[in-house]
Image (cartoon, rainbow, N blue to C red):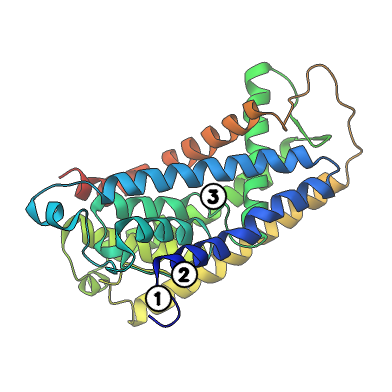
Amino acid sequence: PFENPTPFTNLFEVFLILVIPFSLTRTFGVMVGSVRQGYAILATMATIWLGFVALMMWTEFAHHGPALQAAGGAMEGKEVRFGVGGSSIFAVSTTLTSTGAVDSFHSSFTGLGGGITLLGMMLGEIAPGGVGSGLYGMLVMAVIAVFIAGLMVGRTPEYLGKKIGAREMKLAAAYLLVTPALVLVFTAASMALPTPGHSMLNPGAHGFSEVLYAFTSAANNNGSAFAGLNANTDWYNTMTGLAMLFGRFLPMVFVLALAGSLAAQRPVPESAGTLRTEKPLFAGLLVGAILIITGLTYFPALALGPLAEGLA
């Protein structure tokens, strides 16, 4: 309460969480010689952040039952001084970045609201993400979006004057698959083995969400948690530690390898068939690619956890 006493300080902390990673998009534009390229990335990040805030507000202000109607929203686990609105904005901002700080208990959010915090991390924390890591994660997604666009028009994809070939796509795909593999394999093992299930405070879909959240948070460099899970056991200390180690450092290796591969190429001059990656059309394509790829990767797990709870 002394660090964050009022709704204004709460929103100011949200601003501080977001300001540096959002600002780095202009830094990127200056570095590549086209500020508009940075603005396209900024527009993509901002669209996702605003969409998640709107969805979180909608789920947490849903008035189902007299208790929620009396409180004006789902107030369980939230500070009265911030209310549903301030808590929702903070929850989205802290899970779409690598911050990990919380001003409310994510485990007490509605089923769908908890799912939104999960999905924010599952995107790879790229809207705007952590300082630096969010930008390079978004740029890997931009490479994949350019590749998809190239497949649709039958043209060799290019990004910032560099051709995206087989080597670049293999590195981008490896980056994309590391974190989901860690999250989903470790979550599946925790549910299949007899002992780890004892750490769940809640049964059913919410208990599964607690385990899924623990590994998603660990692998994606976030400090938040569904606090109902007793993670202070040999299994969870070891497995979340491994998720942190591999989930944080392996993607960096693939990003550096991808950067080296692109840097070694000669620039390709633009032509009439070059996809303009500074236009709103590309920003829309990038948003769609991010949501579709993440959805296809994580949807079965989300369906077993937050979606099953929220739609029950």
What is the spatial separation of the Cα atoms under label 3 and label 2, in whole angstroms?
38 Å
Q: Which residue is mark 3?
A: 177
| Residue at x-position 61% and y-position 51% | 175
Callout 2 touching callout 1 (CB < 8 Å)? yes
Q: Position of residue 7 (x, y in %)?
A: 40, 66
Nearer to me, 24 or 260: 24
**Circle 1: element type:** loop
Q: Position of residue 58 (x, y in %)?
A: 30, 44
| Residue at x-position 50% and y-position 62% | 14
Q: Which residue is mark 1?
A: 5
Mark 3 or 1: the one toward you: 1
Q: Residues within 10 Å of mark 2 (few under 14, many from 20)?
A: few
Q: Locate the N terminus by quadrant.
A: bottom left
Number of dots carrying numbers: 3
Q: Quadrant of residue 274?
A: top right
Vertical arrangement, residue 9 with respect to residue 2, above or below: above
Kindly tell me whether residue 298 is visible in this rendering.
no
Q: Amino acid at mark 2?
A: Thr
Vertical arrangement, residue 152 with respect to residue 304, above or below: above
